[in-house]
Amino acid sequence: MSKYITLKENRDFRRLYSKGKSYVSAGIVVYVCKNHTNSKRFGITTSKKTGTAVLRSRSRRVIREAYYELYDNIKNGYDFVFVARAKTPHLKSYDILRFMKELLKKAGVLI
């Protein structure tokens, strides 16, 4: 079993959109909300505004990789939804990592 738990249910995404706190940067948007478990869960959304299927896939891949890099420094007990923006597929992975670190620090979930 993978140590990374992903959000798959539409109700989980809707809960984060409505009750979660959002943090915005040029590259990504992060929604953060406490969960009632002692685990970190995440989901990624990319809209058609991001571009073609190739660009949407690249966006998801880059966001996922940045999350994996920061995983050990994130507090337990939170759910995250990362939303790709139109710029996301054109940015380098270290830019996304920098944006994500900045937003998660602002959210107070980085150790």
Image (tube, helix red, strand yellow):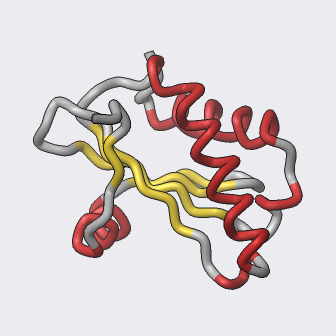
Residue furthest to the front: 1
The image shows residue 74, relative to residue 5, as above or below, that is above
Task: Judge from the rendering whether residue 64 lies leftward or rightward of residue 94; answer left or right.
Answer: left
Task: Judge from the rendering whether residue 63 lies leftward or rightward of residue 22; answer left or right.
Answer: right
Q: Nearer the viewer, residue 106 or 70?
A: 70
Residue shown at the point (47%, 18%) measured from the top left: 73
Can see residue 22?
Answer: no
Can see residue 3?
Answer: yes
The image shows residue 2, relative to residue 82, as above or below, that is above
**Where residue 9 sits in the image (x, y, percent)?**
26, 69
**Where residue 56 sits in the image (x, y, percent)?**
70, 70
Residue shown at the point (32%, 57%) measured from the top left: 7
The image quadrant where one finds the N terminus is: top left
**Where residue 11 sits in the image (x, y, percent)?**
23, 72
**Where residue 74 sits in the image (x, y, percent)?**
42, 25
Task: Judge from the rendering whether residue 10 lies leftward or rightward of residue 49; answer left or right.
Answer: left
Q: Which of 3 and 109 is in front in this view?
A: 3
Residue shown at the point (55%, 26%) measured from the top left: 70
Residue shown at the point (64%, 33%) measured from the top left: 102
Task: Choose top left, top right, bottom left or bottom right for residue 34.
Answer: top left
The image quadrant where one finds the C terminus is: top left
Residue furthest to the left: 36
Task: Choose top left, top right, bottom left or bottom right for residue 16.
Answer: bottom left
The tally of labels here is 0
